[in-house]
């Protein structure tokens, strides 16, 4: 979801609060904060009247804070409650964007746990690879992306498929994702999570489709080249795509660099037709 200016400012302030509180928390405690924030986002989604009350910019922020403290005291931990008070006392562009912000904060807490445990790289890689695995299995994609399917059932399926095979943070994030897709397909959601993990490491993500497998040395050279172009660190997510015939297609954000044989043939065809 693209947030409007007020919501972006509100989310940034809440993220600062989470970061400050997280400095004193162990990894497990950060994961608990993530679970609690996600549970509250679910509560706000299921209770439209409550969602409107906590996001009503025309009401007194202190009143919104009292409402949340009275409602959630003893039901979530102190850290989650402080983050939520920062959320509801800020100005959001819409109730929907407030809920999205709380979900983003839940994901941030889990990624902070991975970072604290020294496992953020592994989580990013697993999320990217899971996206490719699901994309290659249409039936699994359909099951997990189905908006009419029972969300608990989808989360249970993820738990059975991933238990003991991925990082605990990866499993938690994917379980949360399939519960709340908001009309998004699961592959796009996994890609978004992988990019969020990469951004936390202050890097950009280059999605690379290659006609042939790249060696480690080739990946290192490509990463160095992209870093010189974009003047910031770049994380590579490489996907094999023999249909390209030869070369690479690289996407960084909205920019696409197409050096593939197929891409050059298409460009030539457009010129001939022009």
Image (cartoon, helix red, strand yellow):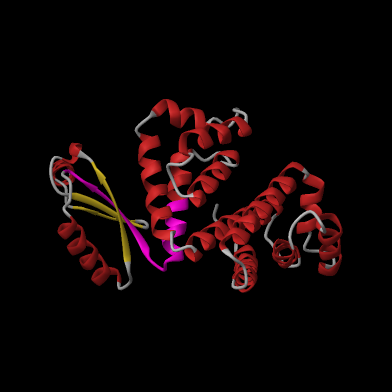
In the picture, measured across the screen, residue 135 lies left or right of residue 185, that is left
Q: Quadrant of the C terminus?
A: top left
* Rendered position, 185 above or below 125: above
**Residue 268 in view in this figure:** no
| Residue displayed at 48% across by 45% down | 189
Please state the horizontal and vertical placement of residue 79, each as a whole percent of the image. 70, 65
For this rendering, which residue is in front, 223 or 116?
116
Q: Position of residue 114 (x, y in %)?
A: 49, 59
> Is residue 115 shown to the viewer in this render?
yes
Q: Is residue 203 magenta?
A: yes
- In this rendering, the answer to whether 211 lies above or below 221 is above
Horizontal side, residue 251 vs residue 105: left or right:
left
The total of numbered circles placed on residues is 0
What span is in magenta? 193-211
Q: Is residue 109 left or right of residue 81?
A: left
Above or below 136: residue 30: below
Displayed quadrant of residue 148? top right
Q: Is residue 31 left or right of residue 209?
A: right
Give the camera-side residue of 231 and 32: 32
- At 78% from the left and 44% from the top, the residue drawn is 47
Residue shown at 55% from the left, 52% from the top: 1
Residue 154 lies, in percent from the top left, at 56, 32
Residue 50 inside the magenta-drawn segment: no
Q: Tell me residue 100's x, y (percent).
A: 62, 53
For residue 136, what is the image quadrant? top left
Q: 30 or 83, which lies in front? A: 30
Measuring 40% from the left and 35% from the top, which residue is drawn there?
Answer: 134
């Amino acid at each position: 979801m693209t947030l409007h200016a007020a919501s972006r400012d509100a989310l940034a302030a809440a993220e600062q609060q989470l970061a400050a509180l997280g400095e004193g928390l162990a990894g497990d405690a950060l994961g608990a904060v993530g679970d609690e924030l996600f549970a509250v986002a679910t509560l706000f989604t299921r209770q439209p009247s409550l969602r409107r009350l906590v996001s009503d910019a025309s009401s007194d922020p202190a009143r919104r804070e009292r409402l949340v403290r009275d409602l959630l005291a003893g039901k979530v931990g102190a850290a989650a409650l402080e983050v939520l008070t920062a959320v509801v006392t800020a100005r959001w562009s819409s109730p929907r964007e407030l809920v999205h912000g709380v979900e983003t904060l839940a994901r941030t807490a889990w990624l902070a746990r991975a970072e604290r445990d020294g496992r953020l790289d592994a989580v990013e890689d697993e999320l990217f690879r899971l996206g490719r695995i699901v994309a290659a299995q249409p039936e699994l994609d359909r099951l997990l992306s189905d908006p009419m399917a029972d969300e608990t059932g989808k989360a249970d399926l993820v738990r059975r498929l991933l238990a003991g095979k991925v990082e605990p943070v990866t499993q938690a994030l994917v379980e949360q994702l399939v519960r709340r897709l908001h009309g998004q397909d699961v592959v796009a959601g996994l890609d978004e999570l992988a990019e969020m993990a990469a951004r936390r490491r202050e890097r950009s993500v280059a999605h690379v489709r290659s006609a042939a497998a790249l060696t480690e040395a080739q990946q290192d050279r490509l990463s160095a080249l992209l870093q010189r172009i974009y003047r910031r660190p770049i994380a590579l997510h490489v996907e094999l795509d023999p249909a390209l015939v030869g070369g690479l297609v690289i996407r960084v954000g909205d920019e696409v660099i197409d050096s593939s044989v197929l891409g050059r043939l298409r460009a030539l065809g457009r010129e001939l037709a022009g």
